[in-house]
Image (cartoon, rainbow, N blue to C red):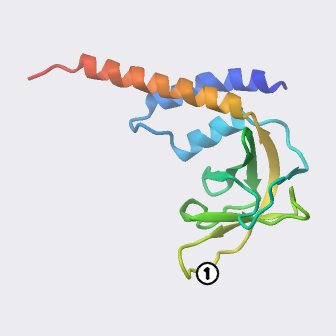
Amino acid sequence: MDIRKVRILALPALLALAACASTPGLSQSEKLALYQANAGPPVQAFSMDDFDFDGGIDGWTALGDSALAVWTGPGEAWLLTLNAPCTNLGFAQDIYLTNSGGMVFARLDKVIPRGIGLMPSPMPCYIQQIQPLDVKGLQTTEKELRQLQMQERAASQGTQTSP
């Protein structure tokens, strides 16, 4: 199925979820749905062109304990689904991706969360699936959700009666 079709089909559901949310941000399951709606078909591996000490990533976002998004360059990001829940992923200050010569492979490489100070590192988390993210599509959808939330806040403030 075409990624644009998936995004178009998923957007109303995401907007409905955001409309029902009583908090200003999205829950982790809503964020995961947003990223999944903007993910392409699975790939076997991706390259970290600018390999460095931090594992060649420019940033990352935990999407629950079994998925995360990693940015490897401007406009280049990947959705990583893990084979099992990864303890402390949501609390990690940093992560490291294992790799083979700058390539990260599904079912071979791992995400290693890094803790605070001298805290021992938890067990590594194996990457089950890798999907490229449509970064522009993700940004567009996030912008639409923010606009919807602002409209809903303005509407709810306008309908309140003063004592």
Image quarter hosting the N terminus? top right
Q: Where is residue 60 in the image (x, y as percent from the top left)?
A: 65, 52
Q: Is residue 142 positioned above or below 9 on the image?
A: below
Residue pictured at 51% horizontal, 43% vertical: 27
Q: Quadrant of residue 40?
A: top right
Mark 1 falls on what kind of element?
A: loop
Q: Position of residue 92 (x, y in %)?
A: 58, 65
Residue pictured at 33% horizontal, 21% vertical: 154
Q: Which residue in the structure is indicated by mark 1?
A: 120
Classify 10 Å Cα crowding around label 1: few (below 14), some (14-19), many (20 and above). few
Kindly give the residue lying farthest to the left in the view shown. Answer: 163
Image quarter hosting the C terminus? top left
Residue 11 appears left or right of 27: right
Q: Position of residue 153 (x, y in %)?
A: 35, 25
In-front residue for pair 57/41:
57
Residue pictured at 64% horizontal, 38% vertical: 33
Residue pictured at 44% horizontal, 34% vertical: 21
Q: Is residue 3 positioned above or below 27 on the image?
A: above
Q: Quadrant of residue 56?
A: bottom right
